[in-house]
């Protein structure tokens, strides 16, 4: 896959948009607007899935990255959050979003940035 600066910029822009979605999700959870949170989460996860497909082949070329591990951890934390939502455990949802989902997303985002930084050396 030939990597261009435009592709790197698009990937980084999308991570920023998804980051903003997580900030909004936190606000929605705090306001006990759980259905809106889930809609935002679904959209964010579609973006993450698209990025994962784009970044995964590149991650294999960048030594010492933890992209796969961070992706699995993020998916696990989101799964736990969704389970709480479906079980109507509102008291756990805010804690999970703050202490688990958002930190897992931040680690994942940093790994995307690591891979993109490593790929810039190949351009």
Image: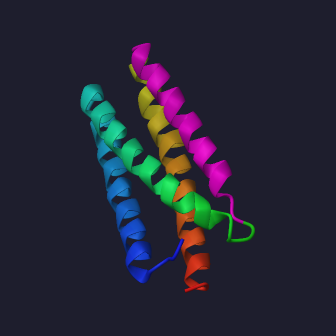
Q: Which residue is located at x 54 percent, y 73 percent?
A: 116
| Picture coordinates of residue 109, whole percent (x, y) | 51, 59
Nearer-the-camera pick, 71 or 80: 71
**Visual colour scheme:** rainbow
SS majority, magenta: helix
Nearer-the-camera pick, 113 or 4: 4
Q: Residue furthest top?
A: 87
Question: Where's the N terminus, which quadrant?
Answer: bottom right
Q: Which residue is located at x 41 percent, y 61 percent?
A: 15
Residue 87 in the magenta stretch? The answer is yes
Residue 39 in the magenta stretch? The answer is no
Q: Residue furthest right?
A: 64
Residue 106 visible in the snapshot: no
Residue 113 visible in the snapshot: yes
| Picture coordinates of residue 53, whole percent (x, y) | 51, 53
**Above-or-below relation of 53 to 59:** above
Nearer-the-camera pick, 66 or 8: 8
Number of marks in the image? 0
**Above-or-below relation of 1 to 102:** below
Relative side of 112 to 47, left or right: right
**Above-or-below relation of 109 to 27:** below
Q: Which residues are magenta?
A: 65-88
Relative side of 55 to 6, left or right: right
Q: Which residue is located at x 36 percent, y 61 percent?
A: 14
Question: Where's the C terminus, which quadrant?
Answer: bottom right
**Above-or-below relation of 78 to 112:** above
Q: Which residue is located at x 60 percent, y 62 percent?
A: 57
Q: Residue furthest front?
A: 1
């Amino acid at each position: 896959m030939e990597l261009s600066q435009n592709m790197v910029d698009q990937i980084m822009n999308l991570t920023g948009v998804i980051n903003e979605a997580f900030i909004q999700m936190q606000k929605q959870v705090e306001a006990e607007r759980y259905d809106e949170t889930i809609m935002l989460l679904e959209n964010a996860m579609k973006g993450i899935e698209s990025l994962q497909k784009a970044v995964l082949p590149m991650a294999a070329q960048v030594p010492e990255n933890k992209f796969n591990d961070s992706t699995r951890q993020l998916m696990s934390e989101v799964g736990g959050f969704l389970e709480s939502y479906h079980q109507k455990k509102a008291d756990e949802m805010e804690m999970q979003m703050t202490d688990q989902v958002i930190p897992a997303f931040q680690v994942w985002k940093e790994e995307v940035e690591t891979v993109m930084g490593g790929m810039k050396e190949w351009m």
